[in-house]
Amino acid sequence: MTIVGVPAGWPATEDEARAVQDELRGRVVLDEPGPPPGTGLVTGVDVAYDDGLDLVAAAAVVLDAATLDVVAEATAVGRVSFPYVPGLLAFRELPTVRAALDRLPCAPGLVVCDGYGLAHPRRFGLASHLGVLTDLPTAGVAKNPFTFAYDDPEPARGGWAPLLAGTEEVGRALRTRDGVKPVFVSVGHRVSLDNVVAHTLALTPRYRLPETTRRADALCRRALREAARSLAGGPDQDSTTRQAPTSRYSES
């Protein structure tokens, strides 16, 4: 098993990481619509951690956007590359996520992250950071609104309300199931907010969360269990394997 290492020159302190965010934030492209919803390929990425073994597993699952059938998938296992700091979660995950994307046999199309893009205190969450580094169109679909305000969307599927930082719209609270808590979508890179909403609805025919996230979540958990078992040389131990802290979903 190959373990992805921490890249040379990777930020090691909070100040270094924030300086990288400041440097790269200006490269986010906001004036492209992105691929049309329901066409081509769309890829979900997600990660899971084993803190005891200092491991992070990433998965990339490519779906046919029209049928939601799996076209390709890849995983990578690496060392955790940054301490847990709210707002800097991308630095823990990106080296391994990029390794998983690099192992795909096809171009990923739009990449959907389980986290944030512009809906981030520094307007540079995981989806935006990944988009700038790869120049792929990216979007964030998160489970909660971080620190941003919103009105409750209409209860029917498709209802949405602006996710606001003061008067600035940084994303949208989107209802993907009738009467179910919304998800929180934001632009990452090279895609419009309207298209992020449309893609998210196309990816949620049955459940609250996009199929991209659901498939990538299951795959990265499995990859982490297998890696932990391989390193331990013993039976699979679910008790040592878990996703990143709950707060990961509000602070990516």
Image (spheres, rainbow, N blue to C red):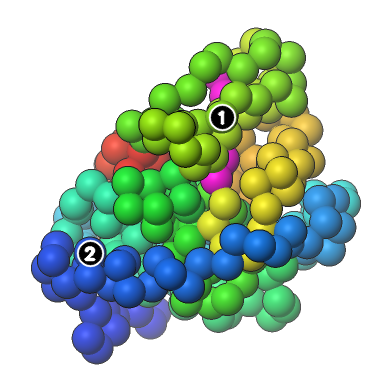
- Residue at 65 percent of width and 25 percent of height: 160
Residue 231 sits inside the magenta stretch: no
Taking the image as shown, residue 251 lies to the left or right of residue 59, namely left
Q: Residue drawn at (74%, 59%), measured in percent from left and top?
A: 33
* 10 Å crowding of disc 2: few (<14), some (14-19), many (20+): some
Q: In the displayed image of the protein, which residue is found farthest to the front?
A: 167
**65 above or below 130?**
above
Q: Could you tell me which residue is drawn at 74 percent across and 25 percent down?
A: 158
Q: At which x and y percent is residue 64?
A: 81, 58
- Type of amino acid under label 2: Arg
Asked whether residue 185 is drawn in magenta, I would say yes
The mark found on residue 221 in the picture is: none
Q: How far apart are marks 1 and 2 (CA)?
A: 26 Å
Give the residue number, with chain letter if any, for mark 2.
Answer: 18
Say if 61 sits above or below 27 in the image.
above
Q: Which of 137 and 220 is in front in this view?
A: 137
Viewed as shown, does residue 154 lie left or right of 35? left
Q: What's drawn in magenta, residue-wise?
A: 181-186
Query: What residue is shown with label 1?
Result: 162
User: Residue placed at 24% from the left, 88% from the top?
Assistant: 8
**Residue 160 visible somewhere in the drawing:** yes
Is 165 left or right of 86, judged from the image as shown?
Answer: right
Residue 127 placement (x, y as % from top left): 49, 58
